[in-house]
Image: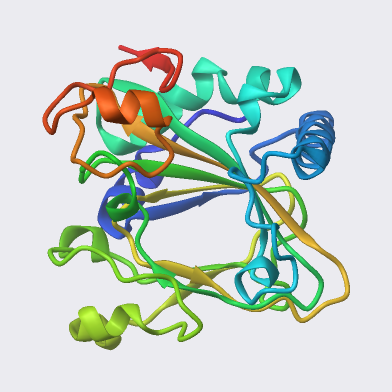
Amino acid sequence: MNTQLTTDQITFYQENGYVVLENFLTPDELARWRSATDEAVAQRLASVDSSLTNQSSPEDYYAQVFTQCLKLAETHSGMREIMFDPNLGQLAATLAGVDGIRIWHDQALIKPPYGNPTGWHLDNPFWSFTSRDSISLWMALDDATESNGCLYYVPGTQKTETRGNTSIDKNIGGLFKTYPEWREIPTVGCPCPAGSAVFHNGLTAHGAGANMTNKPRRAMTCAYMPDGSTFNGTRNILPEAYFESLKVGDLLNDNTINPLIWHA
């Protein structure tokens, strides 16, 4: 992995709320990520537990936005080895400007052939902690193009977010009813070759276009929580027993549920 960040890349991320790092993986590393993702997704989809995938009704609109499989590192050793790499944690921490990084959750996001667009949204308001420094990794396992659903961003919105989120619905522009002032900011598409890493702040508005091709567009992602974050009352992906044990303001520091993968 090319984990060396330039000053310009760090500055770009902090100003715009996202950054694309092309040629992040070597060809061998890309093959490893693809293999682990394909295996872990196949295992999850074959499981009788449908709580960590959105494919219980595969013909529904949202199931055709992407195949979503969460927390694959919990059940696949190859994915766990990839996700627990401290180099990824250090990179995320450097961009976010924090001292430590925990995994919130990993997830595969595979936009199917002729898949529906991903509506504009924010990430962090869905999660069980609130942080202006939350950050996500989006790894392109296939070439991400304007034709097959590459990511789009509204730059700088992580600085002006104040009203939380809207649900991701069939109206892809629903977020702009909550933030009408963001309509005036030009959006930026981020096509990138396979093996590129895209990092974005959890409060940066983003979405993805439809997949207009007959091939899937695969991505493996990981959401990161700054170490020291506290519970905000939302369950999200927390196990029920752990969720029931928490009070608002409690430190989220369980290393089984949210592993600390890097600290200064």
Residue drawn at (77%, 37%) of the image: 47
The percent position of residue 124, horizontal first and vertical second, equals 31, 50
Residue drawn at (38%, 67%) of the image: 121
Q: Is residue 53 above or below residue 74?
A: below
Report the front residue among 15 and 144.
144
Q: Is residue 1 visible?
A: no
Residue drawn at (18%, 84%) of the image: 181
The percent position of residue 237, horizontal first and vertical second, equals 43, 39
Quarter of the image where the N terminus is located = top right
Report the front residue among 193 and 139.
139
Left or right: residue 123 compared with residue 59: left
Report the front residue among 106 and 156.
106
The percent position of residue 6, horizontal first and vertical second, equals 42, 37
Left or right: residue 15 compared with residue 139: left
Q: Is residue 44 above or below residue 228?
A: below
Q: Is residue 123 above or below residue 191?
A: above
Coloring basis for residues: rainbow
Q: Is residue 51 visible?
A: yes
Quarter of the image where the C terminus is located = top left
Residue drawn at (35%, 66%) of the image: 205
Report the front residue among 130 and 157.
130
Query: Which quadrant holds residue 192?
Result: bottom right
Left or right: residue 51 compared with residue 175: right
Query: Which quadrant holds residue 31?
Result: top right
Q: Exactly how many numbered labels are in the figure?
A: 0
The percent position of residue 33, horizontal first and vertical second, equals 75, 34
Q: Is residue 213 above or below residue 184?
A: above
Query: Which quadrant holds residue 209?
Result: bottom right
